[in-house]
Amino acid sequence: METFTATISKTVVGGIEKIVWESNHFVITKLSDVYGFDVEEACRYVGMPELSVAKKASKAPKAPKAPKAKLEKPAFHLPFVGKVFEDRCYGIKNNGCLFNQCMNAKKKDSDYCTTCSKNGGPKFGDIRSRMEVETLAFVANNEKKVVPYCTFMKKKGLSRAQVEEEAAKFGVEIPEEQFVARTRGRPKSGNSSGSSTPKRSSKGGAALDDDLKAAVLACADDDIASVASSSTTSSTKSKRGRPKLTAEEKAERAAKKAAEEAAKEAKRIAGEEAKAAKEAEKEAKRIAREEAKAAKEAAKEAKRIAREEAKAAKKTKKTTEEAVIEADKVTEALAKVEAAKALADAIVAPNTEEMVEEEFVDEEEPAEDSKYAYTEDDEGNTLKINKITNDVYYDETGDLFGKYNPKTAEVIPYDIGSDEELVSDDEE
């Protein structure tokens, strides 16, 4: 006996198992309906395993991408005061001759933003290079000097309170030198006592005269006095060397700042009210436009309905007129039929036999029998017509001549030499 080996895939085996399981489960379910036992308990009793259907593992949902943090920018340009923002572009921007840091985000794997990366790098250099020089001593590569921030504030109409508030949002403290306007020209020379600088004596070369000695001694006395007084005046100055504010100056500054804040808030409220009024006006215009459009659409719809009604009325009128015309035609046709019928009844059809008699009977020779009529052919021979059969015979010979047509009152002779048998009147 030959043997063979067959390979069956897991899918086919699983399908067969499923069919067998469903068949057995159906039988057990039907039996449970009849005998009232539990289906699951019966399945376990007969050792039928539970059917498990393998499901494809669903892919884990992708984690949503975190939205990119939007870099906040100042409401207006701030001066460079030695602080470099590491998360911003390192390029230098002109910005009204402030030559401050570009506040755009850096491009990936670059120290500069997309704009500053064009044309080989920032136009005015790297902001980190400004750390090497004093704040107001920087000169750009276009030979323009940086200006104090007060110049920029004057052009933009900014107050000091606004500037300091905005700078505090970004952790920037603007020094006092940025609020001092730069004067043009060289400062006047001279000492505190108003005396002129002593000149060298024309005599003696390098030797000092009496006036010069006196000036040197006076300056030395002044230096000693200033050193002595510095201990008493240092307490009235801040750590930066600025004079400390008195309580009155602080109160005045606080009141000024509060007034500016109140003015700013009033301006903001007025702006919001104006914006709300503008929005209300805009909404009113929109509603008016929609109402006008709706009215226009309603008028258009009313015109359309009126046109359809007029069209329907016209069609109804036309149909009515056509029906009346058709009825008139029918009435006229019926009248004609009745008239024709009456005329037909009035006309009496003439007797064919009498017509034949009157037309063909010779008055001089009275008819031998009432069933015959007589006439002549083109040669003058007398013809006898049978009124019943309409056959025509020669009166002398009795030979068949032809046929009489009572409708046309014509005698139609038979063709000579025809095979038709001639029957004489005597033979009949």
Image (cartoon, rainbow, N blue to C red):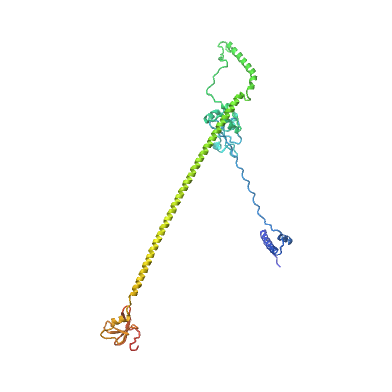
Residue 144 can be seen in this image: no
Q: Quadrant of the N terminus?
A: bottom right
Q: Give the image location of residue 109, x and y in percent.
A: 60, 39
Q: Nearer the viewer, residue 248 or 340?
A: 340
Q: Give the image location of residue 192, x and y in percent.
A: 57, 16
The vertical placement of 397 against 293, above or below, is below
Q: Could you say which quadrant of the image residue 33 lies in?
A: bottom right
Q: Give the image location of residue 420, x and y in percent.
A: 35, 84
The vertical placement of 365 against 340, above or below, is below
Q: Nearer the viewer, residue 180 or 16?
A: 180
Q: Could you say which quadrant of the image residue 70 lies in?
A: top right
Residue 276 can be seen in this image: yes
Q: Quadrant of the C terminus?
A: bottom left
Find the residue positioned furthest to the right. 45
Q: Which of 187 and 165 is in front in this view?
A: 165
Find the residue positioned furthest to the bottom. 426
Q: Could you say which quadrant of the image residue 205 lies in?
A: top right
Q: Give the image location of residue 363, x and y in percent.
A: 26, 84
The vertical placement of 419 against 256, above or below, is below
**Picture mark count:** 0
- Residue at point 29%, 81% (across, down): 358
